[in-house]
Image (cartoon, helix red, strand yellow):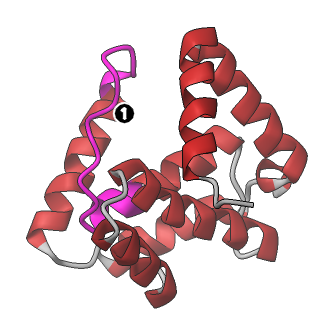
Amino acid sequence: MPEKKTIERARRDRREGKAPTTQAGEFIREEMHHIREGKHGARSTKQAIAIGLSKARRAGVKLGSPPRSAKPATRKSAAYASRAARRGRRPSPKRGRAVERALQREGRAAASHEALARQAHRAARRRGPAARKAAARKAATTRKAA
């Protein structure tokens, strides 16, 4: 269950008209904090991000479906999480405990600054130079006037 603060931040982002991915970023941020606090771990930064995205979908953030290149299991899981948001019920305590215990056995390095930087760099490389340039241009326009 996401923290109240995280849900508030995501709602504020939605009110401000920000993209669903930006709203989901709040849940990913929370996940990174949980790993750093030692609440649980993750095998990789990618897994930590996936957990955050799943939480966002369950909280009702209207994220798109995973890319066609994603595993069928991933696509199924994302669809399940989106449906769970519409149902509006909490996951069963048994399932929650099982997930929590499995994650507690994982390492904590997935949320390190180094690991996050590495993940961001790889994601940017996959997107290509034109997309990177467009992102930089967009970032420059949203930056506050100095």
The magenta segment:
54-72
Q: Tell me where residue 3 appears, x and y as whole percent.
A: 49, 84
Residue lying at 85% horizontally and 53% vertically, measured from the top left: 112
Question: Which residue is rendered at x = 23% and y = 53% of the image?
Answer: 62
Q: The C terminus lies in which quarter of the figure?
A: bottom right
The single residue placed furthest to the front in the displayed view is 146
42 w.r.t. 17: above or below: above
Q: Which residue is nearer to you in this view: 47 or 17?
A: 17
Q: Is residue 1 visible?
A: no
Q: Is residue 114 left or right of residue 1?
A: right
| Residue furthest out toward the right | 114
The residue under the point 41% across, 61% down is 23
Callout 1 amino acid: Thr
Q: Quadrant of residue 34?
A: bottom right
User: In the image, residue 16 lies at what x, y percent?
Assistant: 34, 68
- Inspect this view and state whether residue 58 appears: yes
In this rendering, position of residue 78 left or right of residue 113: left
Find residue 132 and report its horizontal and vertical position in percent: 62, 22
Above or below residue 142? Residue 75 is above
Quadrant location of residue 123?
top right
Closer to the camera, 94 or 76? 76
| Residues packed near mark 1 inside 10 Å, few (<14), some (14 to 19) or many (20 plus) | some
Which quadrant would the N terminus be assigned to in this image?
A: bottom left
**Element assignment for label 1:** helix
What residue is shown with label 1?
74
Q: Is residue 124 above or below residue 116?
A: above
Give percent across and percent down for residue 74: 36, 33
Q: Main secondary structure of the magenta part?
A: loop
Is residue 8 a member of the stretch shown in magenta? no
